[in-house]
């Protein structure tokens, strides 16, 4: 077998602490901890995380695994809620309530942005009954404010981007299954390119930016179809291996994670990573579910609640995904 020096061009270094600016394949000996360590790819996995304080299904989920929010949705016993809860990487706290009343609330709304600069649009609303509200609200980390409405009301659709450069698409619209796309510049809404295959429900199965978005699966016919947006038009790309009916998605066009979904009342925990051209099977979630949202990136994602029926116990459950390059400590076992 070739030595490390032959392969890498130098001997294994002895260091008093782990180095910075690591590259895949680096190996070193930490003299302080007396450990031989390396840096490289590690298989991804799901792990349980603290439950949400209250169940949420069909909710908008925005942000990262250390600064995220879950907004509104259905709430046991199958009622709407207008609450927001915030995640700091270790615990949940109450955030501001959306402008709609507790009795009205919303579900199936489209959300994008960050924990402190978030936008939600559309959704269902119960009191008064509005199936396709055009209402848009923005969050500053403390409170929600109504802003300029969308052109077309829609629910159960998808979104991507930031609150200064956002995108909404698909979902159910007054005219039926939405193929339309709208772009948001932080103030106004304008029409974008139409998606090739309209999907009545996509919800959490989208990610990316306004000029590089990804739409995965959806309900009914195109439940494995995948399309990419370049800021002007949509292009069909490689299908996800199994149905992503109302599942979750996190990341960007070239590094995404798709998980969960499936026709109600069944659900899957299947997880797939995407590198911009091909899909790879990954470790499944512990609890398969659908009607979920997602937040985070393709290597550090989080899914919260969801599940069918909407009063089920899965609405409290949270799982986190971690993958990518990391430091590995060698042992003698």
Image (cartoon, helix red, strand yellow):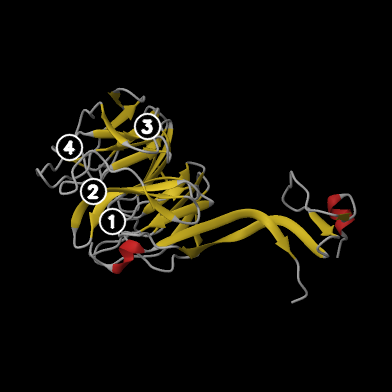
Residue at (11, 45) in percent of width and height: 127
- Which residue is tagged 2? 107
Decide: is 164 above or below 119: above
- Which residue is tagged 4? 133
Q: Quadrant of the C terminus?
A: bottom right
Residue at (80, 56) in percent of width and height: 27
x, y percent for residue 44 = 56, 60
User: Which residue in the rendered view is the most extreme toward the bottom?
Assistant: 333
State left or right for residue 139 relative to residue 209: left
Q: Nearer the viewer, mark 3 or mark 1?
A: 1
Residue at mark 3 to residue at mark 2: CA–CA distance: 19 Å
Q: Quadrant of residue 13?
A: bottom right
Residue at (54, 57) in percent of width and height: 322
Q: Residues within 10 Å of mark 1 (few under 14, many from 20)?
A: many
- Which residue is tagged 3? 166
Q: Residues within 10 Å of mark 4 (few under 14, many from 20)?
A: many
Q: Earlier in the sequence, mark 3 or mark 2?
A: 2
Residue 218: assigned label: none
Front-lying residue, 128 or 295? 128
Front-lying residue, 30 or 246? 30
x, y percent for residue 117 = 40, 34
Residue at mark 3 to residue at mark 4: CA–CA distance: 18 Å
- Which residue is tagged 1? 57
Residue at (39, 68) in percent of width and height: 287
Q: Earlier in the sequence, mark 4 or mark 1?
A: 1
């Amino acid at each position: 077998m070739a030595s490390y020096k032959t392969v890498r061009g130098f001997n294994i270094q002895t260091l008093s602490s782990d180095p910075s600016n690591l590259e895949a394949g680096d190996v070193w000996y930490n003299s302080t901890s007396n450990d031989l360590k390396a840096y490289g790819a590690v298989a991804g996995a799901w792990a349980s995380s603290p439950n949400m304080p209250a169940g949420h299904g069909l909710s908008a989920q925005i942000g990262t695994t250390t600064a995220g929010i879950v907004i509104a949705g259905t709430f046991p016993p199958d009622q709407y809620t207008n609450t927001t809860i915030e995640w700091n990487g270790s615990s949940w706290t109450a955030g501001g309530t959306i402008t709609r009343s507790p009795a009205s609330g919303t579900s199936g709304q489209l959300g994008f942005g960050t924990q402190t600069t978030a936008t939600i649009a559309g959704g269902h609303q119960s009191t008064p009954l509005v199936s396709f509200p055009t209402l848009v609200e923005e969050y500053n980390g403390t409170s929600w404010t109504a802003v300029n409405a969308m052109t077309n009301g829609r629910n159960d659709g998808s979104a991507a981007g930031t609150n200064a450069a956002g995108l909404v698409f698909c979902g159910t619209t007054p005219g039926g299954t939405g193929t339309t796309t709208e772009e948001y510049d932080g103030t106004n809404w304008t029409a974008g390119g139409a998606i090739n295959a309209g999907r009545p429900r996509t919800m959490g199965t989208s990610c990316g930016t306004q000029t590089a978005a990804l739409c995965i699966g959806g309900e009914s016919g195109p439940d494995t179809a995948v399309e990419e947006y370049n800021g002007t038009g949509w292009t069909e790309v490689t299908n996800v291996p199994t149905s992503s009916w109302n599942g979750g998605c996190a990341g960007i066009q070239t590094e995404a994670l798709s998980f969960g979904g499936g026709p109600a009342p069944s659900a899957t925990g299947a997880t797939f990573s995407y590198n911009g051209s091909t899909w790879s099977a990954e470790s499944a979630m512990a609890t398969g579910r659908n009607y979920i949202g997602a937040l985070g990136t393709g290597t550090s994602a989080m899914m919260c609640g969801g599940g069918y029926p909407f009063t089920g116990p899965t609405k409290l459950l949270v799982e986190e995904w971690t993958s990518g390059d990391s430091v590995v400590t060698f042992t003698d076992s």
